[in-house]
Amino acid sequence: MAAKINGIQQLGVGVENVKEAWKWYRQHFGMDIKMFEEKAIAELMLAHTEGKPRARHAVLALNMRGGGGFEIWQHTGKTPQPCPFEIQLGDLGINIGKLKSDNISQTYKRFSEAKLNLLGEIEKDPTGNDHFYMKDIYGNMWEIKNHKSVFKKNEKSVTGGILGTVIGVKNIDESLKVYQELLQYDKIVYDKTGTFDDFKALPGGDKEFRRVLLKHTDTKNGAFSPFLGESVIELVQVLNREPKDIYAGRIWGDPGFIHLCFDINGMDEMRIKVKDAGFPFTVDSANAMDTFDMGEAAGNFAYIQAPEGTLIEFVETHKIPLLKKIGWYIDFRKRGHHPLPNWMLKMFRFMRVK
């Protein structure tokens, strides 16, 4: 079978204090469904951790409105090292996490009343869609994007999960080899060059940019696709400033957006595909074991590195908890990877942490 991208599983968010950060993300972004929490040693990430195994504490959290989750990740064997400069739009790597909202004015009002760090007003993107930007308490930038499709309505949260990311690149045409060809974002929604009113409130957003928005044209049909929903990638290349590497002198897991993770089927086929394209796996859990156990979930994972340095993770899920209290797990090696029914996905709500 061909390797299949099923959607964005999660955005990795490196933090200095995982408990504090997760509480903030639960309170403001509704990321309160705990898929797993684990303290362990990251032994397989040596290519991106200066060749040393690293102790860490990680939580994978979801939002019942759907979309990708957050992998909230803290180094515990060393002091997490924040970025020493303010990240400006177009710096190399993941600049912004995109969250979806089906009521953008309500979200803006709620965040304004909570005195969160909003960057400007609600603006129109180049397609005429409403969105606004903000920073969390750690300085990470987020874009709240009008997106009417949500998995479960009538939730208290005023945002859904991850819709996509904004990624700063050196050369858009080079980076498209990964995002358009390997990650199958085959539709260019827009490709525009100039200065942009909706960027003006962002650090460095007054510069000249080429920006390209990508989406998938097909309907995804993996096990979690109904929950993960559609996703987009926006590439930005700053044209009149020399961009900085966001993770220069730091390692994977240090504070900031550490990786973008895709739920896939066909890890063996993906291994061949990325190697043939010139982006071989830098990390491959299958080299070490048949399945990687994350305590409450299991699967295989691998990483590639895009031309601008962004780490892209692939996860092929083997097992997840559905009702941990009674020991109900789904084993996809037996079940297959066709979409889970909505009633089953809605059972994630029983893993809510208040």
Image (cartoon, helix red, strand yellow):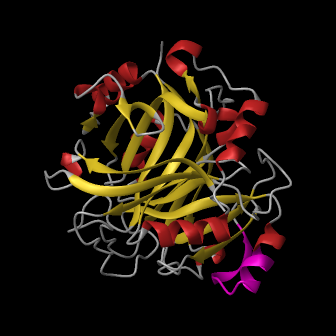
Q: Give x and y (percent) for residue 125.
A: 69, 65
Q: Report if residue 351 lies within the magenta region.
A: no
Q: Residue at x 78, y 77 (%)?
A: 110
Q: Residue furthest right?
A: 154
Give residue 103's quadrant in the image: bottom right
Q: Report if residue 119 lies within the magenta region.
A: yes
Relative to 88, residue 299 above or below: above
Relative to 334, residue 49 above or below: below
Give residue 26's quadrant in the image: bottom right
Relative to 306, residue 2 above or below: above
Please indicate, yes or no, whether residue 238 appears anywhere in the rendered image: no
Q: Residue furthest left?
A: 51
Q: Residue at x 70, y 56 (%)?
A: 160
Q: Give x and y (percent) for residue 143.
A: 62, 67
Q: Is residue 225 left or right of residue 316?
A: right
Q: In the rendered structure, which segment of residues is drawn in magenta?
A: 108-124
Q: Nearer the viewer, residue 168 or 149?
A: 149
Quadrant including the C terminus? bottom right
